[in-house]
Amino acid sequence: MLPRPDLSPLLQIYFLFRQSPGFGDYSATEKLKDAPPDFSHIRCPLCRWQPQKSSRWHCSDFGLHFGCGTNWNTFDTRGQCPGCRYRWQWTDCLRCFRSSPHEAWYAESGD
Ligand SMILES: [Zn+2]
Ligand SMILES: [Zn+2]
């Protein structure tokens, strides 16, 4: 085992910057999470209904999942309930009331 050298001053500055808020140390996934979803590219794969920012889904009992009762816009969180962190694989359409895989709601470009 080699002895660990102390951090070089340059590395220390690097870590300092990494810790300061607002330095732009956001990974691509965090950017995706923070960005408001583009609802124009989201639609029901079955009836093409487009949800609005004000659309709300309800965290209810589903299979082995015990619903926590939270109401939220499931496309703000990519299908994850903010109340209990349960990730919904299926999303009900609020117009035709049929379920589709959450990922299927995101339209491909040109669709
Ligand atoms: Zn929940
Ligand atoms: Zn639908």
Image (cartoon, rainbow, N blue to C red):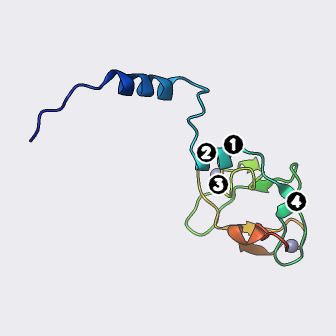
Q: Is residue 31 shown to the viewer in this render?
A: yes
65 on left or right of 60: left
The x and y percentages for residue 38 are 82, 54
User: In the image, is residue 9 above or below residue 73?
Assistant: above
**Label 2 sits on residue:** 30
Q: Which mark is residue 40?
A: 4
> Does the residue at mark 1 contact the one at mark 2 (Cβ under 8 Å)?
yes
Frontmost of labels 3 and 4 is 4
- At mark 3, the secondary structure is loop
Q: Earlier in the sequence, mark 3 or mark 2?
A: 2
Q: If you read the primary sequence from the N terminus, does the residue marked by circle 3 or circle 4 appear first?
A: 4
Disc 1 marks a residue whose amino acid type is: Asp
Whether label 3 touches label 1, CB < 8 Å? no
Quadrant of the image for the C terminus? Answer: bottom right
Question: Closer to the observer: label 3 or label 2?
Answer: 2
Q: Which residue is mark 1?
A: 34
Badge 3: how crowded within 10 Å, few (<14), some, or many (20+)? Answer: some
Q: Position of residue 96 (x, y in %)?
A: 88, 73
Q: CA distance from mark 3 to mark 1?
A: 14 Å
